[in-house]
Each structure stands twice: as C-alpha cells, then as structure tokens.
C-alpha cells in the first residue's frame, strides 16, 4: 500500500500533475514497442539480470516469513498446551525471520536502486539519440509544420517512458513473482485453505476490473476537457488585449464556465471511480481474511490444521492481494509507455540525410565564383518551383533577390547552403559542384545573417564566436566596434561575458547587429544576407545597413531584399514571382524593361489618395 | 497552504466534514475486525468453536468488511467531489480575476506565468486536496483509534510499536530533507533539457550554417547528463522509503510475537495464556495498521511543499486588483448617431508601471471626428504606448486622454471600447471559424443597437461560440464578407475549406502571418466603430497588398476617425496629418510635404526608406 502511494507522489512531482490522471493511451503494437524499448536495455544487461534476481529473491524471502511465523505460533501454542515453551527455539526463529526480512528489504532496495539507474540511463540515451537525430534530419522534414508538434510530444513522451519503466516495470516484476510465489507457498502450506483464499481474492479482483474499465471513460474525457481548458485559458490570456478592446470578456467567461463545469463532473467521477480501487482492494483482502479465519477455524476445530497455519495464511492473504492491484496498474502504465515509445521510435526512424563518405572536405573558395546551372527544384515532387535557372555570380559580386512575400526568395538560400538538394542541374563554387563536397564543407564557405536573429542562451562572446571558435578577443572586439555594439557591451557589468537569457535580452536591433558581428568573425569567403528590418527602428537600420555593406566588401554576396531602396547598388537583381525567377538585371535595366520589378518599385510611390 | 483554506466555502467544508465522518466510521469498522478475530481465536482455543458460533462471528465480520468498503467508497466520493468543486471554483475565481486585469497586471505576472498559475497550479492544489487532505484526516484517525485499542494491553508491545513509529517517522523526515532540494532541482533541469532542445530546433538553420551541430549536441548532452545524475540521486534516496516501511512492518510483527512468548510462558493458567495470546494476534494487526498509516504521511510531506508553492502563486493573483476601473459614464443621445470619434491628448505623460523611464512626455494633440492621423517614429519612440492609452489598456501617468470630450477614465470601459476597433501588429486570432473571428466581440453603448446588425444592443452580439450561426443570418453574413473584402482576405478565405466556416486552429496556427493580419483587420472593420486604431497593422503585408487594402479601407472610413501607427512612410504619407514621435515626445506634426520641409527626424526616416528623387 505504502508503495503505491509513493509512486503516485512521485508521478505528480515529475509531471507537474498535468498528466496525473493518466488517461490510458492504447499503442498500435504493444509488443513491438516494448521490444524496441528493451533494445535500449541491452547496454544494461547486467543490471537487469541483477534486478530480476534480487526481485525474485526478495519476494521469496518475504514469503518464507509467514512459514516461520507459523512455526513460532505453533511453538507457542504447543507451549501453552504442555505448559513449558521452547523459548530458545522461539527466539532463534524470531531472529532468523527478522534477518530474512532485513535481507529481503535490502534486496528490494537494491532492485529499485538498479531499476532507477537503468530507467534513467535508458531515457538519457533516448534523449541523446533524439538530439543527434534532430541534427541529422534533412531540413525539408524539419520545416514541415507537423514536425514541431511531433518534437514537443517526443520530449514529453520520453518522460512517460521513464515513468513507465521505473514504476511499472518494477511493479510488474514484483507483482508477478509475488503472485506465483504466494500461490505456491499457500499450496505447499495447505491446499484446501489455499483454494479458499485464492478463490475469494480472485472473485474480488474480477469485480475490481469492471470498475477500472468503467472509470477509463471518465479519465479520457477528463483529459480532453483539461486540454480544452488549458487551451482556452492560454488563448484568452495571450489575446488579452483583443478580448478587452473588443469587449469579448462575457463570451470568454461563458466558454470558460462551460468547459469548467464539464471538467468538474469528469474530474470527480474519474477520481471517485479510481479511488474505489483501494477500498475494493481492501475488501478483497478482508474477504480473504474472513474466509481464511472462518474456514481455518472450522478446520482447526476439527483438528485438520494447526493454529499457526491460520496465522500464516492471514499474512499470505495480505501479501496476495497486493500483486493483483500492482499488475493491473502496471499494465495501464505499460500501455501508455508503449504508446509514447511508438512516437519516439517513429521519430528516431526518420530518414536521415545521405551519408557523405568520400566527399571533399576541405575545399576553400579562393575566388568566390558561384554558378547555377540549369537548376530545377520543387519542395514537393508535384510542384516544381524553379524550372530552369542559370546564373553565374562573378567573384565579389553583389546579388540581390527580390519579390513579393511568399515568392520563394529563401529557396535560393536553401539550395546554396544545401539545406535542400536540387532536383536536377547543379550549383558549383569555383568550378567544384557543391554536391561533391560535404555539407559541412559547403557551409564553411558561407557567412550568414538571417532574418531570424537566433542567439542561444550563453555569453555574448560564445554567441559571437559561434562560427569560429578560434577567434581572438581582438577579433571579437573589432567586429563589435564595426557594428557599433562595442560601447554597449562594454557598459555591461560582465562585458562580453554577459549571459543572454530570459533575464537579460537584447533588443531586436542589437540582436541583428550581433548576428552581423557573428558573420564578420566567422570570416567566410561567401555571404548570405537576409535583410531583416521591419522590426528595427530607422536609425538602427542605418547602422545595420552600413554594417552589412561593410561585410559584403570583397565577398560574393547574396542578399534577400525586403526594402527596394537598399538594393539599387546591387550588381545583379534577381526578381522572383510565384517561386520563379522572372527577371534579372541591374536596377536601371530592370526599370527600363517596365516589367514586374518596375511595377513593384513604383507601387510604393503611387500617390494613393487619403491614407 | 493556509492561504488556500481561505477559499474553502461552506459547501466545501460540509463535504470535508462528511468525508471526515465517513472516514472515522470506516476506520472504526476496520479496526473492529481484529476484535472478532480474537473472539474466534478464543473459541478455537477453548474448544467451543462450533460451526454455528463460527458462522455467527463470520457474518459479523462480513458485515464489518462490507461496511468498511461502503464507508470508504462514500468518503471517497465526498472527497472527490470536494476536491473537484474546490478546484472548479478556484479556477473560476482565477479566470474571472485575470479577465478584470489590465495590461499592467498582465505584464507584471507575464502571460506565461498566469497560464501556469491558472492551469498547472490549480491541478497541483486539487491533487493535494483530494489525496493529501484525505490522508491528513485519515492518519490521525487510524493512529488515534489504534492507540485507544492497544494502550490497555501489555506495555512492552506498546513501547516496541512506539519505537518503530518514531523510527519510521524520523527516516521519512531525514530522507525528505535530503531529497526535496534535489527534486526541486530536477524540475529546473528538466526545463533546461527542454529549453536546449527547443533552442536546437529554432536555430536549426544557423546551427547548420555554422556547422555547430556538435556544439549544440554537447550543450544538450550536458543538460541531459545533469538531469539523469540528479534524478538518480534523488530517486535512489527516496526509494529507501518503501523498503524501510516494509521491513519495519515485518520486524514489528516478529518483535511482538517474540516479546509475547515470555508472558505467555510465565502466565499461570492456560486460560490466562490464551488471553495474552489472542491479545497478541490482535495487537500485531493494530500495530501494523498504525504503522502503515504513519508511513503514508510520507506522501503528504512529498506533496506539501509543491502544493503550498502553488497556493502562494494562486493567492498572488487573487489578491491583486486591477488598477483600471471603469467609470459610470455610458454616453449620451448624440453617440447613437455615431457622430463622435474625436480624440484629444492633453499634456499626457506616461511611464510603464514599475519603470522609471518615461514612454511619453507631455504629448498634446487633437484628432477630430473623421480625420486620418498617421503616427510615425523609430522603435521605442512611444507610438504603441500612445495608442494604448485610448482604449485604456493603460492609464496616463499625467494629463488626460479625452474621447468625445470626455476623459476616458470617466467612461464605462465597455462603452469606451465599443467606440473603437484596435488592430494590433501581432495578429491574435481565436479558435473557431473565419466567421466567428471576424464577427468577434460585442458592442455596448448608449443605444448601440443602431449600429449593430443583430440589434441586440448590449447583449453579446457574436463570439466564437455563436459564430457558426452566421450562415443563418444573411445580413450578418453579408457584413462579414464585406469586412473580408475590404481587408483583402476574400481570395484566401474562399480557398479555405468551408469558407466562412473555415476552421481557425488555436492561435490561428493553420494560416500564414499575412493572412492572420488581414483577418484581424477584417475583425476591426466588421465592428464598424467611430475610431479605428491600427497599431503597425500593415507591416506584415507587402507593399502592393498594403496599398490596395488601404484604398479599400478608405471608403469604409467615411466619418470615422483613424489612427495609423506605422514604420513605413508609404503607409501614412497620405494621411490628413502625420505626428512624428521621438523619445516619447511629439517632434513634428503636419502633412508629408510640410514635415519633409521642417522635421529632421521625419526626413531621416524618409531617406532610409525612399530614395531622394522619389520623395519630391
């Protein structure tokens, strides 16, 4: 009993209670899921063997106790009858039994200790593999919208597996061994009484099963409404301004109360029904106890058994009812563990990028000429985005890519960096095809400033030298001076060692400048710039622009432009529309042409009336 | 935890009392069982165990057992109800409270924290109330009743039992002392693991571009290892608990039997021996029940710190009052004609609560009914702060904001907000359909019925729940389409399966940023207000869409006052008047041409966006 409560407490603690109710989730293929989980256990073979051994021994020792207890009782009863008791024998047996119990407790601890080590080890390995997997899956897969969901589930799933392993597997082993051991022990002690005890217990257990199945429905519903509730709360809080300024409070409260009431009903029903488990277990125990007492007394009265046998049986019945409940609970948890594992393994089974053995690893772009040769590409086979694109960027050229939102400007970047692979045609740098180099090699050639000003939690310095761990402090300071960040960083208490995290964050402009500095420090021969300016104020924008201009000097660069005014100085402008490159040329020639670019350019100056 | 008791209402206390009562009966019956056992023992030993007598006692025992179960079920029911209704009411109180909060309180707590407080923390409390409180009631009852039953017997037994109980208790305390900080750390380390992985995901492009996969994997591995290590330590210690309990229980039984052997041996007559013997059997049963009760305290110790932290966090919300309280002014006859819409700022200064820096400094301007005003300035120049004072998301620190000549503080907030449509930069959509999102909200006014197609006046006109009715109300459907047309959203709405009934997922995750923005604009248009506020609402659109949209909006603005906050000059250059903000002060006001001539800040902004010859 104490054991079960213990595990409940732990579960709550670990999962923050969100999944405390544990709605049963059915796996598609229970067996294969657990087979895969056990694969992970191979590294822990020795531990698992010791676990099984110590669990069995501990349970058997525990079962042996009642047998000795019977001996003491009989000795005492005999003493009463004869008037002289064999005291040393009683004491000896007492000490023996106590010793056995101590050993059993020790083994039980050893078992749970090793189980914890194994289960935490396995989940650690799983997480490690997931992390490795994330970094070796093609971006095309990562970009798909369903992926983020999958990942967030996977991290939760690992927790579920861990729980399932440490609690349920342990219970399962112990439950089964106890069940078998206890049955055998009872049978050995006295067959008819054993049948009485077993019969009453099993009857009660069947009844309990009905309740468990009943309560399942409420658990599922409760989980659903809890999800709905959390979703509603999240949405309303996040959209607070809109709720307020559109006077949507009444509607929001109405929906809340509706969900809250449904949640309430399913909450107490599921709790009530699951709470019936314990009383029923106790009833089963009591029924067994009662049956043993009455039947046993009758048999004793007729001299069929000794009184000690009854005492032993009372303890056996107590022990016997435990594993039934344990196994029932464990099965539920093992199933949700299997369902979780299925998702984890589905993720781990994702196709990885092609291996790159034998490819060129240390190609350096001396000149910086980038040639696109009859490129054909589509994100999905059904829809070709780039049909036949050829273009050569001469060394040091500034190439700008423009087009309306959603025209697929980033596609070019994706192909250049080999985030995606072309369907046909080729891209080469200084005459070497990028597919003949390793992906790491290709990416080593490019410095990148993206619209997404991603920084990780770490010191400013670590963020800056991200692409070039060998950079000296002087390099870092120089770069920051160039982008105008040095003064600001120096004013911080910890200077370049200031850690960027929730408590200290940079403004979007500063973040942008950080990424530019990072690209400067990485000092790569080619450059990709994704102009991000909508979130930056006009003055910072000027600084960012200057810093970017400085960065492009002497490097072949590709700029994804959002502001038409800034690309007039580009050597070549590629105009994209609906995922295709429709025009190319410099600013003047494109304007003269009077095509899509000219229309785009002029649209910002049309004297629309009013507004 | 005490703070939470304050929120227990009479109904909860009643259920609590019932639970305690049922538990008492249950325990009493449960402890009655060994008494019958002792009777049976006596019968057997004295040779009076006839089948009839045994069955008679057996029937009583059965009654007891069934009674115990019934009581357990009943008390379980009442306690489940109590916990569930308590959490329901608590959740409801929190939600209602947060609904009254102004932006200031939301900012103070942060949205994320408010969400965990209203969801996770409530579940935490519920768990404690349902399991912990039950246990807390049950343990004293078991211990108390068992003590009464056994205190009269042989003292050595009592001593051994007491000693064991003390031992178990002290083990519990020691282990918990050791393990608790580790469990708390475990939570933090789990967050760390998730954060690192999240970081890896969001920064994927940069990571690959810089070939930093190894670096990220190492960072993750460190977090991963720390979590495992800490978890192992914490759990290994707590796992001592069940072993200790089991051993203590078994050892106690053996000890009682061994000790019992002496008095039995010394006792004179067989009858006396028998008495002691039956006592012994019964005593060991009581003792083990008592010990089990005590060891279950461990669970409470486990839950308590967490639950009380949650309780404190919830109490913090419930004890916070909104700083913005509506006035009683509900408008006049004139408002019904919707002739109003004038806005005036009189020497307004504003700083965000809890910060020293001033966001707005002595701002004064007037927007007459029907005027279109553009507001421009660099980031952090106070544009958003300025417009958020109009719907009273915040209150001005100094000076007054007037709408139709009346201070906004005097208005009933519902009435004030019914006069305007506020369209924010990050478009917020709600779960529901296109129709429910566009027709979101309600209008309250002096006689708002005149402008509301539903003619429902102050009643809730349309929320996501009622949005599905749109199809049945042709007038409403027409207005929704009209708003969608103006917001340039028809093309993609028609492509969505179900059109107006097209499903909008949580947070609008199934539609793109630009499309969300257009639906948010449609929502503002549908409201047909006297005042429009567009807070950088056009920036997510490309130039072309931006322009067509503004042209379409123009026709709809007939008579309405419009404030447009923008970062792009092109968006506002044709406004009646443009206000230029810099560092929280107005540094220029006038038409585009005027400002180009006499406002440095404006010119600077303009030159970074448009080339010089184009500006002339």
Image (spheres, rainbow, N blue to C red):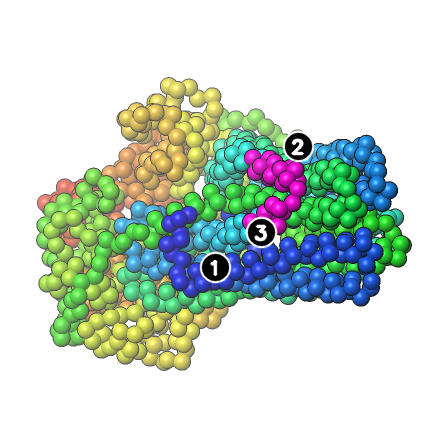
Q: Which of A343/B459 is in front?
A: B459
Q: Are marks 1 and 2 on the same chain?
A: no
The answer to whether one can see residue B486 in this image is no
Instruction: Give the quadrant of residue A197.
Output: bottom right
Tell whether position A345 is magenta.
Answer: no
Q: Label 3 lies in what chain?
A: B
Question: According to the image, label 1 marks what residue?
Answer: B16
Circle 1: is it few (<14), some (14-19), or many (20+) Cα within 10 Å?
Answer: many
Instruction: Give the quadrant of residue B550.
Output: bottom left
Residue under the image location 22 percent in, 58 percent down: B325
Residue, far front = B268
Q: Label 2 lies in what chain?
A: A
Q: Earlier in the sequence, mark 1 or mark 3?
A: 1
Question: According to the image, label 3 marks what residue?
Answer: B145
Question: According to the image, label 2 marks what residue?
Answer: A357
Tell whether position B145 is magenta.
Answer: yes
Q: Which of B14/B322 is in front?
A: B14
User: What is the secondary structure assignment of the residue under circle 2?
Assistant: loop
Q: CA distance from mark 2 to mark 3?
A: 76 Å
Looking at the image, residue A150 lies above or below residue A84? below
User: What is the secondary structure assignment of the residue under circle 3?
Assistant: helix
Q: CA distance from mark 1 to mark 3?
A: 20 Å
The answer to whether one can see residue A314 in this image is yes
Circle 2: is it few (<14), some (14-19), or many (20+) Cα within 10 Å?
Answer: few
User: What is the secondary structure assignment of the residue under circle 1?
Assistant: helix
Residue B280, given in percent of the width and then of the height, sits at 71, 45
Given this view, does label 1 or label 3 mark the residue nearer the observer? Answer: 3
Residue B615, given in percent of the width and then of the height, sits at 19, 48
Which region is colored magenta?
A: B144-170
Q: Are marks 1 and 3 on the same chain?
A: yes
């Amino acid at each position: 009993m104490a054991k079960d409560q213990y595990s409940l407490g732990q579960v709550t603690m670990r999962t923050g209670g969100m999944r405390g109710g544990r709605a049963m989730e059915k796996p598609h293929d229970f067996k294969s899921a657990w087979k895969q989980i056990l694969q992970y256990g191979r590294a822990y073979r020795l531990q698992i063997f010791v676990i099984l051994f110590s669990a069995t021994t501990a349970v058997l020792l525990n079962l042996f106790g009642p047998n000795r207890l019977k001996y003491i009782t009989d000795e005492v009863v005999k003493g009463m009858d004869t008037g002289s008791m064999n005291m040393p024998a009683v004491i000896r047996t007492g000490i023996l039994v106590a010793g056995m119990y101590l050993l059993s407790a020790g083994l039980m601890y050893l078992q749970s200790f090793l189980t914890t080590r194994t289960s935490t080890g396995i989940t650690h390995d799983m997480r490690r593999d997931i992390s490795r997997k994330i970094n070796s899956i093609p971006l095309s897969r990562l970009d798909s919208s369903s992926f983020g969901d999958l990942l967030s589930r996977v991290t939760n799933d690992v927790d579920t597996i861990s729980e399932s392993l440490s609690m349920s597997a342990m219970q399962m082993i112990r439950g089964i061994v106890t069940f078998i051991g206890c049955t055998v022990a009872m049978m050995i002690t006295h067959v008819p009484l054993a049948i009485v005890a077993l019969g009453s217990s099993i009857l009660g257990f069947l009844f309990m099963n009905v309740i468990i199945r009943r309560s399942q429905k409420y658990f599922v519903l409760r989980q659903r409404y809890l999800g709905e509730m959390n979703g509603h709360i999240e949405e309303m809080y996040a959209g607070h301004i809109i709720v307020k300024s559109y006077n949507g409070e009444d509607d929001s409260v109405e929906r809340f109360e509706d969900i809250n009431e449904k949640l309430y009903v399913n909450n107490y029903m599921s709790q009530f029904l699951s709470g019936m488990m314990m009383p029923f277990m106790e009833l089963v125990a009591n029924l067994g106890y009662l049956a043993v007492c009455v039947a046993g007394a009758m048999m004793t009265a007729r001299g069929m058994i000794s009184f000690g046998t009854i005492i032993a049986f009372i303890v056996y019945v107590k022990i016997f009812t435990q594993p039934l409940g344990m196994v029932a609970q464990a099965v539920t948890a093992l199933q949700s563990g299997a369902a979780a594992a299925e998702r984890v393994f589905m993720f781990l089974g994702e196709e990885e990028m092609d291996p790159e053995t034998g490819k060129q690893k240390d190609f350096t772009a001396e000149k910086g000429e980038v040639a696109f040769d009859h490129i054909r590409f589509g994100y999905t086979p059904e829809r070709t985005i780039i049909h036949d694109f050829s273009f050569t960027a001469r060394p040091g050229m500034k190439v700008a890519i423009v087009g309306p939102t959603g025209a697929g400007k980033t596609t070019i970047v994706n192909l250049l960096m080999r985030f995606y692979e072309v369907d046909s045609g080729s891209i080469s740098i200084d005459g070497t095809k990028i597919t003949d180099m390793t992906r790491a090699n290709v990416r080593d050639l490019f410095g990148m400033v993206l619209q997404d000003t991603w920084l990780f939690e770490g010191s400013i310095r670590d963020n800056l030298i991200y692409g070039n761990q060998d950079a000296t402090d002087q390099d870092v300071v120089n770069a920051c001076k160039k982008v105008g960040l040095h003064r600001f960083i120096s004013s911080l208490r910890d200077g370049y060692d200031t850690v960027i995290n929730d408590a200290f964050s940079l403004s979007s402009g500063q973040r942008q400048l950080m990424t530019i500095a990072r690209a400067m420090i990485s000092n790569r021969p080619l450059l990709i710039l994704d102009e991000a300016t909508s979130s930056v104020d006009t003055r910072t924008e000027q600084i960012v622009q200057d810093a970017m201009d400085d960065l492009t000097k002497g490097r072949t660069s590709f700029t994804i432009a959002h502001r038409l005014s800034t690309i007039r100085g580009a050597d070549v402008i590629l105009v994209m529309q609906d995922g295709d490159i429709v025009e190319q040329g410099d600013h003047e020639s494109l304007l003269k042409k009077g095509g899509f670019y000219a229309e785009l350019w002029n649209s910002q100056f049309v004297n629309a009336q009013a507004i | 935890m005490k703070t939470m008791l304050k929120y227990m209402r009479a109904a909860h206390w009643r259920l609590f009392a019932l639970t305690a009562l049922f538990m008492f009966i249950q325990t009493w019956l449960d402890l009655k069982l060994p008494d019958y056992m002792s009777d049976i023992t006596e019968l057997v030993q004295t040779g009076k165990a006839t089948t009839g007598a045994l069955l008679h006692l057996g029937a009583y025992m059965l009654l007891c057992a069934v009674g115990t179960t019934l009581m357990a079920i009943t008390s379980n029911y009442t306690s489940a109800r109590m916990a569930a209704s308590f959490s329901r009411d608590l959740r409801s109180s929190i939600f209602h409270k947060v609904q009254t909060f102004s932006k200031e309180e939301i900012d103070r707590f942060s949205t994320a924290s408010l969400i965990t407080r209203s969801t996770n923390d409530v579940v935490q409390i519920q768990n404690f109330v349902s399991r912990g409180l039950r246990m807390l009631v049950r343990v004293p009852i078991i211990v108390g009743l068992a003590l009464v039953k056994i205190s009269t017997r042989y003292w050595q037994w009592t001593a051994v039992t007491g000693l064991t109980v003390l031992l178990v208790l002290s083990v519990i305390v020691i282990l918990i002392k050791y393990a608790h900080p580790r469990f708390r750390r475990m939570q933090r380390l789990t967050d760390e693991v998730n954060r690192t992985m999240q970081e890896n995901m969001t920064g994927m492009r940069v990571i690959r571009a810089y070939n930093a996969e190894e670096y990220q994997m190492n960072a993750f591995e460190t977090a991963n290892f720390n979590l495992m290590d800490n978890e192992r330590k914490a759990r290994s210690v707590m796992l001592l608990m069940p072993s200790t309990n089991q051993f203590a229980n078994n050892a106690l039984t053996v000890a009682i039997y061994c000790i019992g052997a002496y008095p039995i041996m010394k006792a004179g007559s067989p009858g006396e021996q028998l008495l002691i013997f039956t006592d012994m059997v019964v005593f060991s049963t009581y003792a083990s029940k008592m010990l089990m009760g005590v060891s279950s305290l461990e669970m409470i110790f486990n839950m308590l710190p967490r639950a009380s932290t949650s309780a404190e966090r919830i109490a913090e919300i419930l004890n916070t009052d909104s700083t913005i309280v509506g006035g009683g002014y509900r408008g006049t006859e004139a408002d019904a004609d919707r002739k109003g819409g004038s806005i005036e700022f009189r020497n307004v200064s504003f700083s965000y609560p809890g910060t020293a820096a001033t966001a707005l400094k002595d701002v004064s301007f007037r927007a007459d009914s029907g005027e279109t005003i553009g507001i421009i300035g660099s980031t952090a120049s106070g544009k958003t702060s300025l417009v958020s004072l109009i719907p009273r998301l915040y209150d001005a620190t100094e000076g007054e904001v007037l709408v139709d000549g009346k201070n906004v503080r005097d208005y009933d907030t519902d009435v004030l907000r019914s006069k305007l449509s506020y369209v924010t930069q990050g478009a917020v959509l709600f779960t529901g359909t296109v129709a429910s999102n566009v027709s979101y909200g309600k209008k309250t006014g002096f006689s708002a019925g005149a402008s509301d197609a539903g003619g429902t006046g102050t009643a809730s006109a349309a929320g996501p729940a009622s949005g599905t009715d749109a199809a049945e109300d042709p007038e409403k459907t027409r207005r929704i389409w009209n708003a969608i047309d103006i917001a340039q959203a028809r093309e993609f709405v028609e492509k969505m399966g179900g059109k107006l009934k097209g499903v909008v997922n949580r947070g609008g995750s199934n539609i793109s940023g630009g499309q969300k923005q257009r639906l948010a604009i449609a929502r503002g248009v549908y409201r047909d207000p006297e005042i429009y506020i567009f807070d950088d609402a056009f920036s997510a659109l490309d130039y072309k869409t931006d322009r067509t949209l503004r042209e379409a909006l123009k026709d709809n603005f007939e008579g309405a006052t419009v404030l447009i906050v923008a970062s792009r000059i092109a968006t506002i250059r044709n406004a009646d008047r443009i206000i230029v903000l810099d560092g929280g002060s107005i540094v220029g006001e006038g038409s585009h041409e005027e400002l180009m001539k006499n406002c440095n800040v404006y010119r600077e902004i303009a030159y970074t966006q448009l080339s010089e010859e184009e500006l002339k």
